[in-house]
Image (spheres, rainbow, N blue to C red):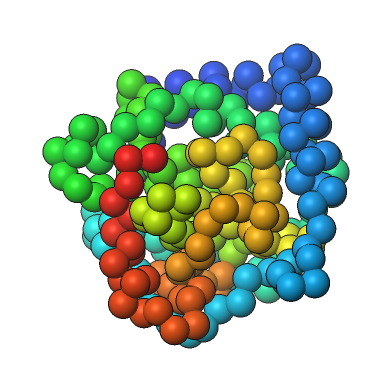
Amino acid sequence: MFGSKLLGTFILVWLGLLAVPHLAIAQGTANSAWRAKPSQSAPSSMRIYGHTAPPIGYVQLCQRDPAECRPAAVSLDRMELTAARLAEVAALNRQINLAIRPATDKELHGVDEHWSYPTLDMRGDCEDYVLLKRKLLMELGWPASTLLITVVRDERKEGHAVLTLRTSQGDFILDNKNDEVLAWHRTPYEFVMRQSYLDPNRWMSLEPDDEAAALAVAGVRSAD
C-alpha cells in the first residue's frame, strides 16, 4: 500500500494530468488507439485456455498485503470505452511512464522478484507500473474486474508485465514500454497468462499448448 509521502507525490503527478497542455498529446495518443480495429485473424478479446499458476511475485505480494489481492465486487460488463475515457487513460499511461524511472527488483529490493508500488524515489520495474496504473484507474471508477495484470513475453522473449483493460471495444494494453494504448493484438508480445476477471487470485493461461514455457516466464524477471 502507499505510504503518505508516496501518495502525496503521486497526487502531484495526478494533478499534472488535469493541466490543459497535456490534452492535445493525450487526445492524439487516444485517437491512435481508437482507430485500432481487430483484423479477421485476431479477435478483439483474448482467448483463455484454463487455469494456471499465478506469478510468484503476485503470490508474495498477496502474502505481504492480503488487502491488495482481496476480490472486489465483480462486474461482468466490460468498461464502455468512450473517446473521452480513452483520452483520460492515455494521459494517465503516458504520465506514469514519464514519472517512474525503470529499475530492476535486484537494484531496488536486493531480490530477483518483488512486486510492489514504485519506490519513494520514483523507480520501479514493469509490474510496479502496472500496480500503480491499476490503482489510479480504480480511483477513477474502473471496476477491478476490467483491469487485469497480464504476463507476456516481450520482443526479446523475456517476461514482462502489462495491464489489460477489458472494454466494450475489446482488450487494450497499458505498457511502460509504450505510451500508446494499443489493442492487445497490435502489441509485439506473446501473451502468457492474466488474472481472471471473476477473481484476481485466479490466473488464466493465454497459451493453448505451452504450459512449461508459461511457467518459465511467470516470475516476470525482466529489467523493464
Q: Position of residue 147 (x, y in %)?
A: 58, 57
- Image quarter hosting the C terminus: top left
Does residue 113 appear left or right of residue 55 in this picture?
left
The extreme left residue here reads: 110
Q: Quadrant of residue 43?
A: bottom right
- Hey, which quadrant is residue 17 in on the image? top right
Q: Quadrant of the N terminus?
A: top left
Tell whether 88 sits left or right of 66.
right
Q: Position of residue 91 (x, y in %)?
A: 68, 32
Residue 180 x %, y %: 66, 39
| Residue at the spot 41% in from the left edge and 50% down from the top edge | 156
Q: Nearer the viewer, residue 142 or 169?
A: 169
23 is higher (above) or lower (below) than 209 = above
Looking at the image, residue 98 sits to the left or right of residue 55; the answer is right
Residue at the (74%, 35%) spot, across then down:
29
Q: Position of residue 50 (x, y in %)?
A: 48, 84
Instruction: Please tell me which residue lies in front, 85 or 214.
Output: 214
Q: Image point 67% across, 44% down: which residue?
A: 181
The answer to whether residue 67 is seen in the rendering is no
Toward which corner of the image does residue 109 lie, by quadrant?
A: top left
Residue sitting at 80 percent across and 31 percent down?
28
Q: How many marks?
A: 0
Q: Nearer the viewer, residue 22 or 36?
A: 36
Residue 7 seen from this side: yes
